[in-house]
């Protein structure tokens, strides 16, 4: 099971992102593998907003968000009061940004590996969930 941070989804969608190639390849393999993907609902908003801000193209950004929703094996997790409290606790304990804490809380709740390009999340969340970059995840697939 995987949870994929918006940073990876955005990098996979935008060719000028430094981690585009690794992120796009990781997503291609993830979608082909049939692995379960558990995403917080905020992922769709984050991906769409980031694509719109970086490209200035609202239609393109909405397509990117819709593609994120169309991943095979996807389960989207809402942010109810229980999930929000779990994320808030992680945010305060690990000193994470709000959205990052929601991804970590989702991964922790379902027991998934969190894939992210955010090195702060890699460093701070590793004590509670397994965290990999797309490049790390790809390297594991080769073994």
Image: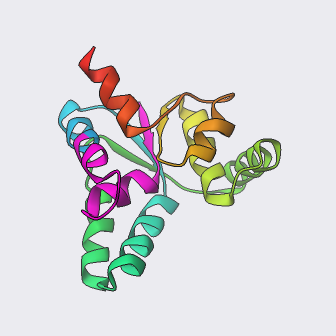
User: Looking at the image, which is closer to me, 121 or 35?
Assistant: 121
What residue appears at the point 29 percent right and 53 percent down from the top-left corner?
20
Residue 45 is a magenta residue: no
| Image vertical order of residue 92 relative to residue 133, above or below | below
Q: Nearer the viewer, residue 138 or 98?
A: 138
In the picture shown, does residue 27 fall above or below 141?
below
- Res 129 → quadrant: top right
The quadrant in which the C terminus is found is top left
The residue that appears at 39% across and 51% down in the rendered structure is: 8
Q: Position of residue 101 (x, y in %)?
A: 66, 50
Q: How many marks?
A: 0
Q: Which residues are magenta?
A: 1-25
Instruction: State the residue at coordinates (65%, 56%).
Output: 80
Instruction: Specify the farthest residue to the left.
Output: 32
Residue 5 horizontal side relative to residue 134, left or right: right
Q: Residue 137's x, y, as percent?
A: 37, 30
Q: Is residue 23 magenta-colored?
A: yes
- Quarter of the view holding residue 108: top right
Q: Quadrant of residue 140?
A: top left
Q: How is the image coloured?
A: rainbow
Q: Is residue 142 above or below residue 31?
A: above
Indicate the quadrant containing the N terminus: top left, top right, bottom left or bottom right: top left
- Residue 96 shown left or right of residue 32 in the figure: right
Residue 107: image x %, image y %? 55, 37
Give residue 86's position: percent from left, percent from top. 73, 45
Instruction: Decide if residue 16 is on the left or right side of residue 108.
Output: left
């Amino acid at each position: 099971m995987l949870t994929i941070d918006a940073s990876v989804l955005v990098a996979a969608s935008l060719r000028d992102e430094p981690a585009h190639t690794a992120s796009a390849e990781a997503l291609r393999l993830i979608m082909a593998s049939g692995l379960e993907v558990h995403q917080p609902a905020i992922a769709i908003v984050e991906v769409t907003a980031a694509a719109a801000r970086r490209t200035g193209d609202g239609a393109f950004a909405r397509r990117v968000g819709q593609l994120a929703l169309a991943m095979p094996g996807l389960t989207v997790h809402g942010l109810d009061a229980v999930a929000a409290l779990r994320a808030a606790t992680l945010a305060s304990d690990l000193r994470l940004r709000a959205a990052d804490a929601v991804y970590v809380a989702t991964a922790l709740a379902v027991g998934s590996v969190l894939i992210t390009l955010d090195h702060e999340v890699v460093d701070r969340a590793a004590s509670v969930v397994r965290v990999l970059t797309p490049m790390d995840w790809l390297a594991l697939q080769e073994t």
